[in-house]
Image (cartoon, grey):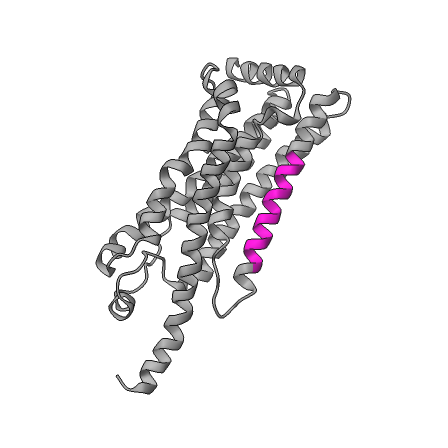
Amino acid sequence: MSSADFGSVSTLVFPILKGIQNMRYALVAVYCFLIYDWLLSLEREIRLIHKARWTSIKTLYILCRYYGIIVWPVFIWAYVQNHGGGLCQRVAYPVHWLFAFPQIFSQAVIAIRAYAFAGATRMAYLVLGSSYLLGVAVALWAFFRPVAPISVLFYDFVGPNGCFPDINNSDDIVLRIGLSVCAHTLTDLVALGRCYRLQQGRGYLARYFVRQGLLAFGLMASTNGVAAALYYGSPAMKSATGIPFIISISCVIACRLFDPSVARESDLDRLADISVEFNND
């Protein structure tokens, strides 16, 4: 290879390597955040969740809380640890599937809470169920479509590396994830709209539901905005550093909706009654 050819290849490869390194930092940072948030909430979780009887809400909480903690080491193994090109060709696509479920679990929490708050009516069931199923369908389409791994030639040139998707398809991948986020944002808006319309005359509990929904929506929108700015603000690098945060933050927020620190005990009793009523229907 001539010095000119080496220079042109290096110009293409080095930004990719820098983007990969940033993505690795983000993956490890997200896992540390998941563990930190879990430990921070563990005492309340044991008292309010683990000692309670099994309901759909409790099941969803367990899925939201522990899916990331259990599965994220798989992402770290696939993306942070170095592998050869042959292995990455086999594992890149299956590992990508695992990113679909955090949004599915977290949006189920949003939809069920709004459904119970709306009185478990048929109209609420149709509206919230339709928006949730749309979000699930988009998430499955976004993450289960084939993803091309980085070419084996890349590993031949730089040596073992993480099993990342091909950066040439990064725009398509980010577009799919963005559409999935938009679909689940629609679920949030529908749920929030139903709660807002029904809050009149229902006291502190109604305001508590709406305030929680607004806070959750604001946090998600902020995270998505920062991630989009990181990606599109540097066209040469296409930094996908924010993607792990987009995928993980929804479950963290869903778990925080169970946090009793901002509610009065009487309201927590009513929230428990709503969950029981929903599961008995």
Residue depicted at 40% across the width and 55% down the height = 24
Residue depicted at 24% across the width and 59% down the height = 84
Query: Would you say the magenta stretch is mainly helix, strand or loop?
Result: helix
* Number of numbered markers: 0
Residue depicted at 52% across the width and 37% down the height = 252
Q: Does the rendering let one see residue 134? A: no
Q: Position of residue 2 (x, y in %)?
A: 28, 86
In this picture, residue 243 sits left or right of residue 191 = left
Q: Does the rendering let one see residue 32? A: yes
In this picture, residue 84 sits left or right of residue 96 = left
Residue depicted at 54% across the width and 14% down the height = 276
Residue 179 shown in magenta: no
In this picture, residue 154 sits left or right of residue 244 = left
Q: Position of residue 248 (x, y in %)?
A: 48, 42
In this picture, residue 58 sits left or right of residue 164 = right
Residue 214 shown in magenta: yes
274 w.r.t. 84: above or below: above
User: Farthest residue toward the right?
Assistant: 201
Quadrant where the N terminus lies? bottom left
User: Farthest residue toward the left?
Assistant: 86
Q: Position of residue 158 (x, y in %)?
A: 29, 68
* Magenta segment boundaries in residue numbering: 213-229
Q: Position of residue 39 (x, y in %)?
A: 47, 32
Where, by quadrant of the figure, is residue 9 drawn? Answer: bottom left
Where, by quadrant of the figure, is residue 267 drawn? Answer: top right
